[in-house]
Image (spheres, grey):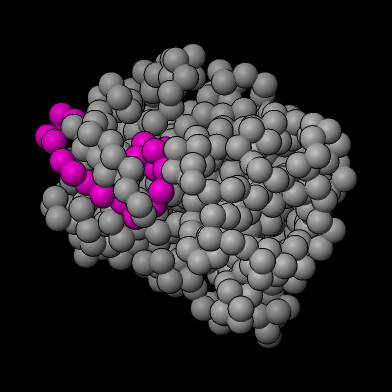
Amino acid sequence: MFDTYEQAIEWIHARLRLGIKPGLTRMEWMLDRLGHPERRIKTIHVGGTNGKGSTVAFLRSILESAGYRIGTFTSPYFEQFNERISVNAQPISDQELIELTNVIKPLADELDETELGGPTEFEVITAMSLYYFAKMSPVDVVIYEVGLGGRFDSTNVIHPLLSIITSIGLDHTAILGDTYEEIAFEKAGIIKNGVSVVTGVKQPEAQEVIRKKAVEAKSPMYQLERDFLTSSRVSLKLGEKFTVSSMFGKLEHLETSMIGSHQVDNAACAVMAAKILSNYYSFIIEEIHVREGLSKAYWPGRLEILSEDPFILIDGAHNEEGINALASEIKSRFTDKKVSILFAALKDKKLDKMIAVLENVADSLTFTSFDFPRAAKAEELLAAGSTSGNNDVAEDYKEFIDQRISGMKEDELLLVTGSLYFLSEVKPLTVSLLKNK
């Protein structure tokens, strides 16, 4: 058993060696041994390719503003592992994590010896979160973010009040499929019988897959720009302004503090979810709660400005759709800046297409790597790009950022993007360097 936080974290991270093992059998085995904690909590399930974390943040913030105690289960973490299990945006304590690890480890050890095989890191953390919210820290509702896919994701053991599918993109194709329809089928796996589903999916072929699943499950479906509409979109310096209209009425001039037109889609899904909870599940959510919640919502690493002098921006665009959304914002918002990009990614992504988009908006593009099992090497990224003289390699990204901070001019912008795991290392480093500059 574990006495220290460091021991607990080391054991959890050691489960990474088991990789990704889709399927619910190990989760069901552990939950049975734990007395089925998933049956004792109210939940909301959020899946999709991009926008999951932001949508969780918007909805959590709305519900918090309405006075509810909200649990969240998200990934990856940004500055502290404990962030993955939080209550009202406050991560669980180190002592609570130790207690949870001591509850789950004996089950993992027992599973290791069975034909099912040991649980993965993500399965272990999912089980911890369910036990925590059911038995250690009760909340009004827990918002669960899907880890990968949906149908066979470890979070899919819950039966939620509401399901949300934010978007569909060609990510994790080796596991989820090569087409929008195949990926939509996996994402739609979180739809439960009779449970309403809100979706921001835009591709017609993916929408049809989700619609068929909803019909089959007799689940009411609410589609962005069909059942709830956005209008009057205006980009602000530090956010977005827009209107949402639905069967529940119109909310005009809503504002977020998160940058990007794609965040309007995510916010609209959260607003529709809040309206469904209010009208059908007796949650008391007034218009002021929606406005306050959206304006206060924060999610790290999504077009996040770390500094305006020097101008440093980070964004976790880790797949083709994310990169396209990022490039669109760079083109529309920062036309007066010379854009330098530092990019690191995982090697299982469509690197050539992502890099081609970045090359189109960057005045200079620098590739780097970081200490993570699936991280692509800087030279691999360079080889995936064009032979442009504007592409380069930085072996030490810490030294690169330090030098850029010291030498940046007023008309320059440094954008650090790619893997969210990379950004979780970059953000605290950059914040520290900025304080000491």
> Where is residue 73 shown, x and y percent of the image?
49, 57
Q: Is residue 257 magenta?
A: yes
Please state which of residues 418 and 335 is positioned toward the viewer in this rendering: 335
Specify whether residue 125 is in view: no
How many marks the image carries: the answer is 0
> In the displayed structure, would residue 79 be above or below residue 50?
below
Q: Which residues are magenta?
A: 246-265
Q: Residue at x 43, y 19 (%)?
A: 207
Assign the N terminus to one quadrant of the image. Answer: bottom right
> In the displayed structure, would residue 221 be above or below residue 257?
above
Image side of residue 253 versus residue 406, left or right: left
Image side of residue 62 versus residue 287, left or right: right
User: Which image quadrant for residue 8?
Assistant: bottom right
Image side of residue 288 versus residue 271, left or right: left
Please state which of residues 35 and 303 is positioned toward the viewer in this rendering: 303
Q: Is residue 190 magenta?
A: no
